Amino acid sequence: MTQGITPLALAPLMADQLARFLETERSTRDRSDNTIRAYQADLLAFLAFIGGHHGTPALPATLGQLTQSDMRAFAAAERARGLSARSLARRMSATRSFIRWMSDRHGFDASRALAARNPRFARSLPRPLAVEQAQDLLNLAAEAHPEAWIAARDAAALTLLYGCGLRISEALSLNGADWPLREALTIRGKGGKERQVPVLPVARDAIAAYLDLCPYPLEREAALFRGARGGRLNPSVLDTAMRNLRQSLGLPASATPHALRHSFATHLLAAGGDLRTIQELLGHASLSTTQVYTGVDDAHLLTVYRAAHPRG
């Protein structure tokens, strides 16, 4: 908060309205649990600030009186607290959506508050692995752990991330009933949206090799990828395995399990894949999210040009 402004408790009426808004977002716009939690934090921060800014807990009437100056003051306060430009852009977007929703329900004119522009931020480019680096990493994973079945498990899970472009949560949510993998895998992604992802033979073979060595029986309702004690594999275990692998191969800290998903998209694009298809494979709701990979490809081409050109 800005100096001299103390956040106030949320009024019961506004708490009720906030809960209704979040439920509307969840049910009608199919928002994921993580998105709802982020929106809740964003809006609690906004309403607390507005309450302190005006000296009284925020009410629907308060929102109807907001101006561009109020919105700019909130943005400045959040930046002063150290919120990143990207997080602030999301926070302001959630705030604008809530104000618009409240104006529809309570019949006030929100045009002055909504006229404030969202802060701009430079979208950072994904940092994929090179094709050779991805191959070396998967080869090493298959023999990196002293227990053969765990090494095979890690290699299979990482191969699935790279070969199908899955999020780590999507790969680790697979159950025994999903095996054997068909030509295409049905994945339930963010917001519960389903997509079909082709399965490469190399990914199917890696999982088969892991299951042959796994000491736990394959059960329809149990996890496909098991932890050392037989439970569902925790993402942090793969994070640790990836950290050890990148240290062995001298890869940068950006070489995380999620970087394999970035690598999947970037390598497809470099091989001639079209953005719409890649968007569908990744499960992106918006094409603009997928378009970031064109920047990666352009940056790579520029690096190669500068290195190879005789006057570079």
Image (cartoon, rainbow, N blue to C red):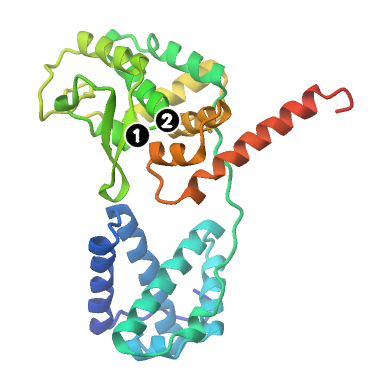
Name the quadrant containing residue 28. bottom left
Determine the residue positioned at 57% across, 66% down.
119
| Residue at numbered disc 1 | 168
**What amino acid is found at the position of numbered circle 1 in the picture?**
Ile
Q: Amino acid at mark 2?
A: Pro
Report how far apart the C-alphas of labels 1 and 2 lie in the structure: 7 Å
Helix, strand or loop for disc 2: helix
User: Viewer-proximal residue, 245 or 170?
Assistant: 170
Pinpoint residue 259: horizontal percent, then vertical percent.
48, 32
Could you tell me residue 312's position as x and y percent?
A: 85, 28
Q: Residues within 10 Å of mark 1 (few under 14, many from 20)?
A: many
Considering depth in this image, is 92 or 48 the residue closer to the camera? 92
Q: Along the line of sight, which residue is nearer the eye, 256 or 180?
A: 180
> Residue placed at 19% from the left, 26% from the top?
178
In this image, 267 relative to 221: left or right?
Answer: right
Residue under the image location 46 percent in, 31 percent down: 256
Relative side of 240 to 82, left or right: left
Give me the disc on residue 53.
Answer: none
SS under mark 1 = helix
